[in-house]
């Protein structure tokens, strides 16, 4: 039976621990109740003693299930940005936790009660402070800015007779970039001469017409091919340092908006991998051409909010 949303909101307001019997736990509780009725009805003291013994064990299992979750204290949740449809890593740091082995089911939940299951294994984070950490992965179903408000921890251990869970309040933001395409479309390239670059009048092998000993010049001018071949550092003079710059522009009219955004995201990732400078222009303005990881992340975030 599906729990109404207003009840779920009330449950999540405070970090309480909730315990309900599993199927096997329900069978056990029903058996204990039936044995109690039979022992009282037939005045069977031996059966009553055995019933009370099972009831005591059941109570111990119930209390242990509560303690198992009560020791858990959350410190922080770190979630990475990523492309929709791909696995994104997540780390949950704990201030305190019960001794392993543990079998938890963790999930992130947002305001719309969308649940993202996390699978992870509790392990020691460091020997100095004995902090513990759960590492897992989630998959964003579509692009956009995801705001997660609760972390749910659920388990049926240590005995499997009771299902125990609790909610931790968190405030985690993550961007889901447009999904990448399997094939990269062609990109419009335009020539650009970066500041300090020059074009030599002559060309030879590898677009170089002269080599000179290395005297502290910029590393980009070193001929690494010659270094790999002869083991000597030389710089390239007269090299054609013309580089390609890609300018991405968000079209005003979309025939297929999601495919267009995926195309731009795929091409941007390719430019980053090839160290090709690129810029991006949309309603928010135009960025400067760059090929850094921060520039890529900023552009992909703007795409995810289109």
Image: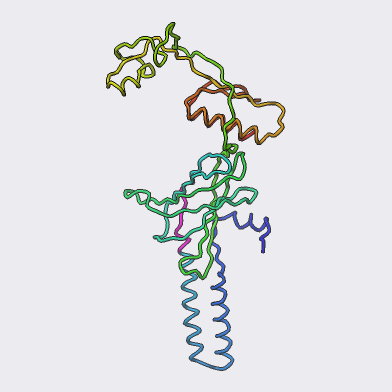
Picture quadrant of residue 4: bottom right
Residue farthest to the left, as pictured: 231
User: Which is more toward the observer, 23 or 48?
Assistant: 23
Query: What is the magenta range?
Result: 68-77
User: Which is more toward the observer, 53 or 160?
Assistant: 160
The chosen color scheme is rainbow
Quadrant holding the C terminus: top right
Residue farthest to the front, as pictured: 205
On screen, residue 110 above or below 303: below
On screen, residue 33 above or below 199: below
Q: Position of residue 184 (x, y in %)?
A: 57, 32
Q: Position of residue 109 (x, y in %)?
A: 59, 50
Q: Is residue 70 magenta?
A: yes
Q: Is residue 11 magenta?
A: no
Quadrant holding the N terminus: bottom right
Residue at x 49%, y 46% (from the top left corner)? 90
Q: Position of residue 132 (x, y in %)?
A: 40, 52
Residue at x 66%, y 58% (from the top left corner)? 7
Picture quadrant of residue 251: top right
Residue at x 30%, y 22% (from the top left corner)? 229
Q: Position of residue 105 (x, y in %)?
A: 51, 57
Residue at x 42%, y 10% (from the top left corner)? 203
Position of 136 with respect to 208 (left or right) is right
């Amino acid at each position: 039976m599906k729990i109404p949303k207003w009840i779920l909101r009330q449950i999540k307001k405070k970090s309480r621990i909730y315990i309900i019997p599993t199927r096997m736990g329900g069978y056990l509780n029903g058996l204990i109740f039936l044995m109690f009725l039979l022992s009282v009805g037939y005045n069977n003291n031996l059966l009553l003693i055995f019933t009370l013994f099972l009831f005591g064990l059941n109570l111990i299992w119930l209390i242990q299930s509560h303690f198992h979750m009560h020791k858990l204290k959350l410190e922080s949740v770190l979630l990475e940005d990523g492309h929709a449809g791909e696995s994104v890593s997540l780390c949950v740091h704990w201030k305190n936790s019960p001794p392993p082995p543990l079998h938890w089911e963790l999930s992130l939940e947002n305001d719309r009660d969308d649940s993202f299951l996390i699978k992870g294994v509790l392990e020691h984070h460091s020997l100095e402070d004995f902090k513990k950490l759960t590492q897992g992965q989630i998959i964003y179903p579509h692009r956009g800015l995801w705001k997660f408000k609760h972390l749910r921890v659920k388990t049926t251990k240590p005995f499997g007779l009771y299902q125990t869970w609790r909610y931790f309040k968190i405030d985690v933001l993550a961007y889901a970039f447009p999904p990448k395409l399997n094939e990269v479309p062609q990109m419009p390239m335009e020539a650009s001469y970066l500041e300090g670059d020059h074009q030599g009048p002559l060309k030879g092998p590898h677009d170089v017409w002269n080599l000179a000993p290395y005297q502290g010049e910029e590393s980009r001018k070193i001929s690494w091919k010659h270094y790999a071949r002869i083991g000597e550092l030389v710089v390239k003079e007269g090299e054609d340092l013309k580089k390609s710059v890609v300018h991405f522009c968000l079209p005003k009219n979309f025939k297929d908006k999601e495919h267009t955004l995926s195309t731009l995201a795929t091409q941007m990732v390719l430019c980053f991998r090839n160290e090709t400078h690129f810029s991006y222009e949309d309603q928010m303005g135009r960025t400067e051409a760059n090929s850094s990881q921060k520039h890529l992340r900023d552009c992909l975030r703007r795409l995810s909010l289109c």
